[in-house]
Image (tube, rainbow, N blue to C red):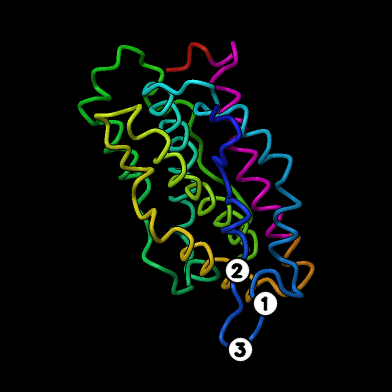
Amino acid sequence: MLNRTRLIDTPESVNRVSPGKDGADGADGADGALVALRAATAQRHELLHVIMPLSVESVALRDYLAHLALLRDWLEPLEAWLKNFNDGPQARTLPARIDRLALIDADLAHAAARQQDDPAHVASPARMQAWRGAQSAAYRWGVCYVIEGSQLGGAVLYARLRERLAPHPLGFLAAGRETLGARWQALIRALSADLHTPAAIDEACRGAADAFDRLIELAQCRTSAACANVA
């Protein structure tokens, strides 16, 4: 079964950030930013394990494609909104950005995907809406925490699915899987350095919760009768 695979956020082995050169404990230190973000999103995280398209006992290519289309509907408004800022997480020098939308589009356009008869994987622009979150850098740290975490289970999923879903290359899951842990650690260190007050941490938790809630909304919409006829 794949329904216990971490599809969003990160396994505990990656969550832990090693001490920095100055001996600080990084994200698990006194500021508590990561602890607060985990607590604020834990129930949402668990819900996504059972409602995302890959949370089934026997994953087929159509499930992977539906998973990608859902992530695209979620990511595109978020990415467009984040481009409007140049402070907070957008000002930090972090590892090279992964163009997730391009990876998703390439996988959806692959020859193996085009052979699918089920149109469920087709992206649904009618469901998209502009993201209108808070303007603060702290809120955006929370959003970025969820976006970065959304790909951390990719290496595990790639290993499990690459033979089953061949000849599709699963490019979205494969991209940068050797460096995902390092990317996550860099993000959490930067996040913790900026979120050093209770008010900022609370605002980041609100951003993370909003980002999770939007993905949950899209995932539930995908399977609900009310959205059955949305193209």
Q: Quadrant of residue 107?
A: top left
* Marks 1 & 2, CB-CB < 8 Å contact: yes
Give how far across and how far down residue 171 sits, in percent: 31, 42
What is the crowding at mark 2: few (fewer than 14 residues within 10 Å), some, or many (at least 20)?
some
Give how far across and how far down residue 29 sits, in percent: 72, 74
Q: Nearer the viewer, residue 41 or 89?
A: 41
Image quarter in which the N terminus is found: top right
Q: Indicate left or right for 186 with 204 as reference.
A: left
For label 1, the residue is 25
Give me the residue at 32% from left, 31% from top.
163
Q: Which residues are magenta?
A: 203-227
Q: What label does residue 22 carry, if any?
A: 3
Q: What label does residue 17 carry, if any?
A: 2
Q: Secondary structure at mark 3?
A: loop
Q: Nearer the viewer, residue 2 or 87?
A: 2
What is the crowding at mark 3: few (fewer than 14 residues within 10 Å), some, or many (at least 20)?
few
Amino acid at circle 3: Asp
Q: Residue 220 in magenta?
A: yes
Q: Residue 99 in magenta?
A: no
Q: Indicate left or right for 159 with 27 as reference.
A: left
Mark 1 and mark 2: span between their CA atoms? 7 Å
Give me the residue at 54% from left, 23% from top.
56
Q: Nearer the viewer, residue 137 or 193?
A: 193
Amino acid at circle 2: Val
The image shows a total of numbered marks equal to 3
